Image (cartoon, rainbow, N blue to C red):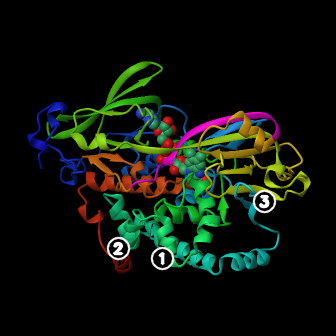
Amino acid sequence: MCGSLLPLFAVVLSGCFAAGDPEGSAHVDGSPPSKIAVVGAGIGGSATAHFLRQHFGPEVQVDVFEKAEVGGRLATVTVNHNDYESGGSIIHSLNLHMQEFVKQLGLKYRRSVAGKTAVFNGEEMILEETDWYLLDLFRLWWRYGISFIRLQMWVEEIMEKFMRIYKYQAHGYAFSTVEELLDSLGGSGFINMTRRPLSDSLLELGVSQRFIDEVIAPVTRVNYGQNVSIPAFIGAVSLASAQNNLWAVEGGNKLVCSGLLKMANANLLQAQVNTISPIQSGEALQYQLSYTSAAGTESELYDIVVLAAPLQTGVESGLHFQGFTSPFDQLPREYHSTVATIVHGYLNTSFFGFPDPRLFPFASVLTTEKPDLFFNSVASVCPVNISAGFRRKQPQEAGVYKVFSPQPLEKSELKTLFRSYYSVQVTEWKAYPHYGSNQGLPPVELHQNLYYLNGIEWAASAMEMSSVAAKNIALLAYHRWNRQTDMVDQKDLMHRIKTEL
Ligand SMILES: Cc1cc2nc3c(=O)[nH]c(=O)nc-3n(C[C@H](O)[C@H](O)[C@H](O)COP(=O)(O)OP(=O)(O)OC[C@H]3O[C@@H](n4cnc5c(N)ncnc54)[C@H](O)[C@@H]3O)c2cc1C
């Protein structure tokens, strides 16, 4: 370990520490940390603050920096006095951290309102959900053979393995890399799934090309704005969210973030963190965060820092590393642009081959991969507060619709999709990683006691994934601080846990 040889100031650190060097991260005198910083108050940062409080206890000061809105990519827009989700909107019933947050915070599940889905290929609907489950099953079988059964079994097997994380975390085990975490859940198979295109995995499984084009691609387009060349792991997460057992938080998903910050008794600083620099004082390494708020630019020292904001190219994250060696400048990666357009108006059902809107039975329309299709999906959406008497608007009535598209919609495109409209609200998201090339997974430990949460998004981007990463980082930070090496990156955990009982 080179910590004790380090000179006082950060700039000389260059060339001494390797990023993610776990050797140097144990605390020297056994005293607890006094201050921890979390950068970002999305679900990742808020959940991190909550878990840090759980593990480090009531004494430590937890400061959470947020440059914009608490919630981050969980956000709402207001239409006609009602709020609608414009970012992350649905949660799977097996997402146990999100469930637990909602329970602990006394929040409520939003009532789901039934609605049928269809798939449009630019000319006609090629797949239409009906009111009859058995008829839908028969049609799937008729058109695609047993592809959908193979797919269902594949997704269930992956989910079953993924669920092991809750057991491991409940027993206090942490992982120093996303690869270690995935390996503990599904072995090398899971890691390979982050490198291999979804389409290749499905073809190998015996799923037909037609099923991939007409069913899988529309699902990956609506969930991640990308096609079936996304890695198989994120593809499986996407397909899991195409199941029926989904939920959301009454009042808006972002309520979880503000609730967790409050429950963690964290200090929320409305400020943008500009630079992070390591400062060596004696044997202790701390981090100086310089940040800008309405009051001006200030700086503060922290024992542990968690970055819970994506480091992305093409967007000014505003965050710079000073006095570190180079791996950090390779961290920023490309995020995918998805535009969420919330329209209050009348859907042009003729465009989908239904001249009479009263005969249009669908709440959501997904699309196949067609170069001239300018949108990924359009869906009638429900507000975040659903009253007992709420009913979805019929297509002949003015309703609220969410359109996902790769670019902002032109006026002519809006006029193609809507007969007329009262309002249009556009949110241009850097939504999730652009899963194109095989770049490997970013590190979790950037430096001693400096952690990066959003690398997990390169395995899969979802609220629950950020929550899993938050719990992992809180545990990892705790074990590193207390030199508990037997709780990090342990092998054969299923067996170990059984014998612990
Ligand atoms: C359109 C869309 C639809 C989605 N649908 C779903 C879905 O249905 N289900 C699902 O599970 N997931 C969905 N997701 C993904 C999900 O929203 C994200 O994976 C999750 O919200 C990420 O949370 P996070 O806290 O990790 O990051 P973020 O929410 O991005 O939070 C990071 C925060 O850090 C702040 N920040 C950044 N830099 C700084 C700085 N220098 N100083 C201070 N603060 C800073 C940002 O302002 C932001 O608030 C969707 C995402 C989008 C965009």
- Mark 1 touches mark 3? (CB < 8 Å): no
Residue type beneath disc 3 = Gly
Q: Residue furthest top?
A: 296
Q: Is residue 330 above or below residue 130?
A: above
Q: Is residue 65 visible?
A: no
Question: Looking at the rendered structure, which numbered label has been put on residue 42?
Answer: none
Is the magenta region chiefly helix, strand or loop? strand
**Position of residue 37 in the picture relative to residue 146 (left or right):** left
Residue type beneath disc 1 = Glu
Query: In which quadrant is the C terminus drawn?
Result: bottom left
Q: CA distance from mark 1 to mark 3?
A: 33 Å
- Which of pointers 2 and 1 indicates the residue nearer the eye? 1
Residue type beneath disc 2 = Leu
Residue 67 point in image, percent of width and height? 48, 31
Residue 62 point in image, percent of width and height? 40, 40
Identify the residue under disc 2.
493
Residue range in magenta is 419-437
Q: Is mark 2 within 8 Å of ligand 1?
A: no
Identify the residue under disc 3.
115
Residue 32 point in image, percent of width and height? 29, 46
- Which of pointers 1 and 3 indicates the residue nearer the eye? 1
